[in-house]
Amino acid sequence: MLMRTDPFRDMDRLAQQLLGTASRPALMTMDAWREGDEFVVEFDLPGVSPDSVDLDVERNVLTVKAERPALNGDRELIAAERPRGVFSRQLILGDNLDTENVDASYGAGVLTVRIPVAEQAKPRKIMINTDEGDRQAINA
């Protein structure tokens, strides 16, 4: 059987898998870091209404969904490079985070999620006895 391959079609298919399509975007960019006793995650959601953002935590999985609605059909588009539709991203959170006290805010197209470190995961000092009977603190 003779098969014909089109390298441009293959490149289009690969680009759609990596970058998504206008109807199904694959990317919700984010930054994450630790700041003192909490982890901070920022998601870029420019042009997304705060009402369309949905944040959910279930069994140490943080799910962020947002929607950028399609443009009205009565416009003649010259270029359409900004993805539209539903965006979704999931993060698996470690057991050392307090998922009961997650705080989120949205401003200037950025969703900021703050997740505190759980009390049992914070560093603490443990007192030990020495042979001489006096106590010394050792960082654990």
Image: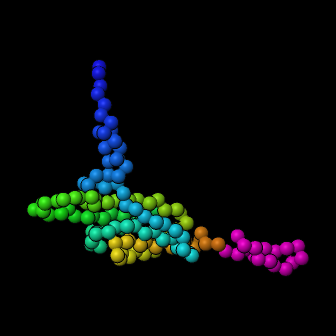
The x and y percentages for residue 87 are 31, 60
Residue at image point 36% right, 57% down: 27
Q: Which residue ends up furthest to the front in the rendered image?
A: 78
- Locate residue 36: give its quadrant: bottom right
- Locate residue 118: give its quadrant: bottom right
Is residue 133 toward the left or the right of residue 48 in the image? right
Q: Which residue ends up furthest to the top in the rendered image?
A: 1
| Residue 70 higher or lower than 20, as above or below | below
Residue at image point 34% right, 59% down: 88
Q: Nearer the viewer, residue 63 or 1?
A: 1
The x and y percentages for residue 104 are 40, 74
The x and y percentages for residue 13 are 32, 42
The x and y percentages for residue 126 are 72, 74
Is residue 124 toward the left or the right of residue 113 in the image? right
Q: Which residue ends up furthest to the bottom in the rendered image?
A: 134
Instruction: Report the span colored magenta.
Output: 124-140
| Residue 102 higher or lower than 68, as above or below | below
Q: Quadrant of the C terminus?
A: bottom right
**Coloured how?**
rainbow
Residue at image point 29% right, 73% down: 50
| Residue 86 seen in this snapshot | no
Residue at image point 41% right, 72% down: 112
